[in-house]
Amino acid sequence: MEFNTFVGQLTTRKTECLVIAYGPKGLDCSDLQQIDQATEGLIARLIKKGDLKYADGGMQLINEPKGLAAERLLIFSAGKEALNEHTCLNTLSALASQLARLPIKSVSISLEGIATAERERPWQAQQLARKLGEAAYLFNPFNTREKKPASLSKVSLFCPAKQETGAMKQVLHLGGAIANGVNFSRELGDLPGNICTPTYLASQARALASRYPNLDCKILSEKQMAALGMGSLLSVTAGTEQPAKMIVLEYKGGKARSKPIVLVGKGITFDSGGISLKPGAGMDEMKYDMCGAASVLGTLSAIAEYNLPLNVTGIIPAVENMPSGSATRPGDIVTSMSGQTIEILNTDAEGRLILCDALTYAERYKPSFVIDIATLTGACVMALGSHASGLLSNDDTLAEALENAGQTSGDRVWRLPLWNEYDKQLKSNFADMANIGGREAGTITAACFLGRFTKSYRWAHLDIAGTAWNSGANKGATGRPVPLLVEFLTGQVSQ
């Protein structure tokens, strides 16, 4: 999707659709005044008749509006009072969805009627670009009867003053890059497990690196992982014919000697549960167990497109978890890359087994800090639902920065504790630790397990089990937490 800016009169703007907001200022807004005068009082009449009113998601579409150069006029409700971040994002989402349904390829938009508490116009513009890009996503490569319809491809944003255009183009570029990263992540998540294998993820990482000169990719084979002592990771892949891959992407946008931020994404391309087999109902959704990996690829795609001046390394352990005669059994003991031994009491608690070796591997990059992203526990879904991702961290400053980025992007997180009392639940009679800590506080004990492999650096864990995809009629990957991660990383540049 192409984003541009324009200045001048809205009434003479030639476009397939002109979009304006009906906000707190009502007809006192300069946009609405221009349109009302050019259309001989159309806006005032719509307000008087009740066709235009303050309502969540309210839209009024007028075809061939007399007095305007635009082919269509779309007026959307922006609230009677100033919007907060959450309600503004909802409003922009509704607008983006409406525009995606219209048979148009280009649109001109003015946000002058929107008032957002504590957020300036550049933030609105960035979120608009992101929401428009996300609304254009359609996954139907396997639908042989339905062709992908023509969609919105060109967006122009009105700027009241010419000197604002440069700054607006910058934030539109960022918003568009985030949307592209989100959609890349969603597509990988929505692909079935027979296509999106560890080998396929590795090919997508290589293809991504080939598009950007400051992005390098290397793939570790099972033989190389065995030589490094990654017994925990390799225990998960023991039951499948699909070879495991360790994907490493290095984005070098910052100074050569700057320590990288490391993102580690869980890449279970299909999770049957292994010998601890999952129930059949809903098991098809276990193709989404690689959404942590997909979010790392989506984030790196976004920051590379935006050319963010920062060093970021992505590490993705990619495996398939299947039952067979060679699969790991409950009660087996394995040795991780760190040298710590693990008693595997449940083979369906496999994400932490691949992440712990990836987190140990991350040490060699001497990171400024590490963030892992994983669809790790059903307990997180029970605790937080689909609204917030779980956040656990050994560093308060890092956790606070992630919380702030979540609030700014609308991709929110909620912090849970990492207390020693929870860590004690991982005790094993036969090894250094068990891979599960019982039914109580499952999200926290899973993070405590990972915390045993992150003692040498600042670390945060994002449990996205409830936010990575939607079930039911709207089943599909969400691309979260790409917006959160990109917002966080752009914030790190200024620091």
Image (cartoon, rainbow, N blue to C red):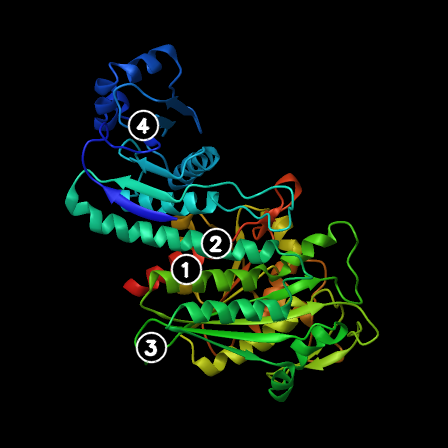
Q: Residues within 10 Å of mark 1 (few under 14, many from 20)?
A: many
The residue that disc 2 covers is 182
Looking at the rendered structure, which numbered label has been put on residue 23?
Answer: 4
The residue that disc 3 covers is 258
Distance between mark 3 and mark 1 Cα atoms? 20 Å
Q: How crowded is mark 4: few (under 14 residues within 10 Å), some or many (20 or more)?
A: many
Secondary element at tag 2: helix
Q: Answer left or right for 90 relative to 438.
A: left
> Which three-letter amino acid code belongs to the residue tagged 2?
Val
Does label 1 or label 2 sit earlier along the sequence?
Answer: 2
Q: Is residue 353 above or below residue 410?
A: below
Distance between mark 1 and mark 2 Cα atoms? 8 Å
Verify CB contact (< 8 Å) between mark 1 and mark 2.
yes
Looking at the rendered structure, which numbered label has been put on residue 302?
Answer: 1
Q: Can residue 228 be seen in this view?
A: yes
Verify CB contact (< 8 Å) between mark 3 and mark 1.
no
- Percent across and percent down for residue 202 are 56, 71
> Which three-letter amino acid code belongs to the residue tagged 1?
Ala
Distance between mark 3 and mark 4 Cα atoms? 45 Å
